[in-house]
Image (cartoon, rainbow, N blue to C red):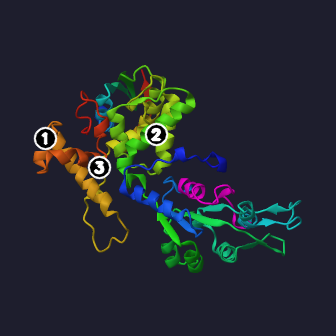
Amino acid sequence: MVSRDQIESVLGRIRPMMQADGGDIEVVEIQGNSAHVRLTGMCAGCPSAQMTLYVGVEMVLRDEIKDFEELVVV
Amino acid sequence: MRAPGAFSPDDIVVGHSSRMRAIFDFVKVVSRSDSSVILTGESGTGKEVIANLLHHSSSRRHQPFVAVSCALFSENLIETELFGHERGAFTGAIKDKPGRFEMAQGGTLFLDDIDDVPLSMQVKLLRAIQNRTVERVGGTRSINVNVRVITGSKRDLKKMVAEGSFREDLFYRLNVLPIVLPPLRERREDIPLLTDFFFRRFAAARGVAAPSVSSAVRYAFARYRWPGNVRELENACERIVQTCTCGAVRTGCVAAGVLFGAGDPVPAAATAELTAGDTQSISLDDRLRDVESNLIIWALKVSDGNKSKAAELLSIKRSTFGDRIARCGLMDVGATEPGDVAVGVPA
């Protein structure tokens, strides 16, 4: 099972840039090997931001955390 | 930009970097000549743009500009592509076909990816360029061609000559006027200018106003390595303009790969000591910039983004600190809004 710390440490690398823009990517909960996240702030309602960010972030998570399965947008 | 007619001088962005300025000055000088030019640079650094510019500022500008990538064709096909063929030369050759050399008659022929031309073809190319004649495949008559040859290479041909994979005689024939295009990461000071240019252009094509760009996005763009160089930056800007729903470019618009690339600490190689066993070439300027930008990030972090304090920590003048930050691509100082602080120091 993946840990919240693992997820947070990956997200931590891009978080300062998102926060500088008044946004964030928030980990709501970990379920098994999947993480439920929410995009908050400026880009929250933008469908393009969901695509570019979630898809890319999921790829990096899968790449760097063995067993990581899915990023779920809630 | 592949089509010859598509080139316009508006596609040219000179930029602030001294290396690019030197290149454009050199282009002005050599565009009047008919000698061979060889453009060396990584993929996406603008070889075809410069080739276009050379042609369009030469006296041949009213004649055709033919660009062809030598990497596109197999060993057999490349000969018929470049030199053409006669009817009946081989199965399927149902009519005469002029090659690229003939199509460029009176104008300029840009042979890109010359480093991918097989050795067997190199000798034929040398003959054609040297004698200014081509023979179509299956033909016997020599056709005079008056073309200026510009070549593009992503590899250092001189090294390939040393390794024996490129003919020395062809190299010297091509290498009359060499131009080396720097990768984007070695001229980061031009990233803000190029970013604005591409956003403006794609927005205009879409019929919308150019979007505003947040400092965090500028920071990410300035830090990312851009392995695909200007072409990758261009594509990133196009994608953002096509997908933007709010008219403002923020981190949410930027591909995660760019953000992660920008957020990653400078690779250990930048500080690692070299031993006699290391034989790969490195860029001194790149490394010095990495060291400089690491120290600036550290100082800004320690001083909570206060530039005067940070300059003091680094024992440099406050007045030159902004220039150093910009030179390292840490922050587009000029474009930062007053209320917009400390974006230069995430991580």
- Residue B298: give x, y in percent of width and height: 18, 45
Q: Amino acid at mark 2?
A: Phe
Residue B50 on the magenta segment: yes
Pointer 1 chain: B
User: Which residue position holds label 1?
Assistant: B308
Mark found first going from the N terminus, 2 or 3: 2
User: Which residue position holds label 3?
Assistant: B327
Q: Secondary structure at mark 2?
A: helix
Query: Whole-Å distance between the Cαs marked 2 and 1?
Result: 32 Å
Q: Is residue B141 above or below residue B66?
A: below
Q: Secondary structure at mark 1?
A: helix
User: Which residue position holds label 2?
Assistant: B197
The quadrant holding residue B334 is top left
Pointer 3 chain: B
Query: Whole-Å distance between the Cαs marked 2 and 3?
Result: 19 Å
Q: Residue at x 63, y 68 (%)?
A: B117
Location of the C terminus of chain B by quadrant is: top left
Q: Is residue B61 above or below residue A53?
A: below
Q: Is residue A52 above or below residue B37?
A: above
Query: Whole-Å distance between the Cαs marked 1 and 3?
Result: 18 Å
Q: As drawn, is B161 to the left or to the right of B282?
A: right
Q: Secondary structure at mark 3?
A: helix
Q: Residue at x 35, y 48 (%)?
A: B189
Q: As drawn, is B76 to the left or to the right of B197?
A: right
- Residue B205: give x, y in percent of width and height: 56, 32
Q: Amino acid at mark 3?
A: Arg
Q: Amino acid at mark 1?
A: Ser
- Residue A2: give x, y in percent of width and height: 35, 35
- Residue B70: give x, y in percent of width and height: 64, 62
